[in-house]
């Protein structure tokens, strides 16, 4: 049993689940990557540019994927060939002009400029996002719960007067949405996704940029796709997509690969993002690699269907 969540009550996982997930992992494609915000970080060759681009890309990775990619393309077009260099030289007044018309759902140009200022200050204080993050990290902790709580608090505790015109973050700003905390119960999906990108080894999908965090400490990013699919695969019995669900799913995946429990996240998520799995339509199930152990529309795990 995973040392992370020894209190969870669970039924044994299907013995077929791991080989099916391993096959799904092996079949990840560049087509899937191009339909993912992570692809925008891979467009830069330099590791420092990729790190900065990854945090920006993950911050705006909510909503329709086409809109996400459009927003990111606009941001990086304005930042030029080196996101890190742009951040190092970032001037709030100039940024306000650059991004005056920016809007991604409820985040606006002011929120984006606050994010860029936060990145600049992380680089100024620590030299990299990784070094800043690792100031909050306990290598002996079973997972990143405490680290993320401290990291988000540290970011929100920076001074943003040049952006907001006042010492604190005004209540009408959605900038704090970029840095949720496990302490509030949030699943912290986008931060967990960012960490998967930069911590897991470079396998053609994830970036393998950081060395100071172990992949075994990561928590799976839980969005609506992972919530639904994880329930269908008996990886969680919870209903709410919160931090408890994220840790429970990770604990079950830890049983399959304790060194790298979130390795399957990209494959599972793209069953929904790219392959059309919505938990209702039967057509995607006919070619889905985990259908034999899934309780979805045509999954065999639900038992025989009446009239079939």
Image (spheres, rainbow, N blue to C red):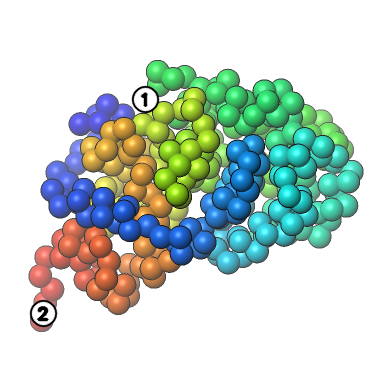
Q: Earlier in the sequence, mark 2 or mark 1?
A: 1
Viewer-closest of 17 and 279? 17
Q: Is residue 271 above or below residue 76?
A: below
Most distant residue in the bottom direction? 307
- Label 2: how many residues lie within 10 Å, few (<14), some (14-19) or many (20+)? few
Q: Is residue 92 above or below residue 133?
A: below
- Label 1: how many residues lie within 10 Å, few (<14), some (14-19) or many (20+)? some
Circle nearer the viewer, 2 or 1: 1
Q: Is residue 297 visible?
A: yes
Q: Position of residue 21 (x, y in %)?
A: 26, 52
For disc 1, the marked residue is 142
The residue positioned 28% from the left and 33% from the top of the image is 258
Viewer-closest of 186 and 27? 27
Dot 2 falls on a residue whose secondary structure is loop
Q: Horizontal placement of 204 versus 180: left or right?
A: left
For disc 2, the marked residue is 308
Viewer-closest of 99 and 205? 205
Q: Horizontal placement of 49 versus 294: left or right?
A: right
Q: CA distance from mark 2 to mark 1?
A: 46 Å
The residue positioned 57% from the left and 39% from the top of the image is 180
Q: Position of residue 28 (x, y in %)?
A: 37, 57
């Amino acid at each position: 049993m995973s040392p992370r969540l020894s209190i969870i009550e669970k039924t044994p996982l299907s013995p077929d689940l791991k080989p099916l997930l391993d096959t799904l992992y092996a079949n990840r494609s560049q087509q899937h990557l191009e339909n993912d915000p992570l692809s925008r970080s891979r467009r830069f060759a330099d590791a420092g540019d990729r790190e900065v681009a990854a945090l920006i890309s993950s911050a705006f990775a909510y909503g329709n994927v086409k809109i996400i990619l459009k927003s990111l393309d606009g941001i990086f077009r304005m930042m030029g060939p080196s996101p890190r260099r742009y951040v190092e030289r970032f001037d709030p007044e100039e940024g306000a002009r650059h991004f005056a018309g920016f809007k991604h759902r409820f985040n606006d140009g002011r929120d984006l400029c606050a994010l860029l200022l936060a990145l600049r200050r992380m680089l100024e204080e620590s030299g990299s996002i990784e070094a800043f993050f690792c100031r909050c990290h306990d290598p002996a902790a079973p997972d990143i719960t405490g680290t993320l709580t401290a990291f988000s608090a540290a970011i929100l505790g920076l001074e943003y007067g040049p952006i907001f015109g006042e010492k604190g973050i005004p209540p009408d700003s959605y900038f704090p949405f970029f840095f949720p905390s496990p302490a509030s119960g949030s699943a912290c999906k986008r931060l967990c996704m960012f960490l998967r990108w930069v911590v897991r080894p470079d396998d053609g999908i994830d970036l393998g940029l950081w060395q100071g965090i172990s992949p075994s400490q990561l928590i799976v990013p839980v969005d609506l796709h992972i919530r639904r699919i994880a329930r269908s695969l008996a990886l969680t019995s919870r209903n709410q997509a919160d931090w408890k669900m994220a840790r429970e799913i990770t604990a079950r995946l830890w049983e399959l690969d304790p060194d790298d429990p979130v390795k399957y996240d990209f494959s599972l998520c793209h069953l929904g993002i790219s392959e059309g799995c919505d938990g209702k339509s039967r057509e995607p199930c006919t070619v889905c690699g985990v259908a034999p152990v899934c309780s979805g529309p045509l999954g065999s795990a639900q038992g025989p269907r009446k009239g079939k």
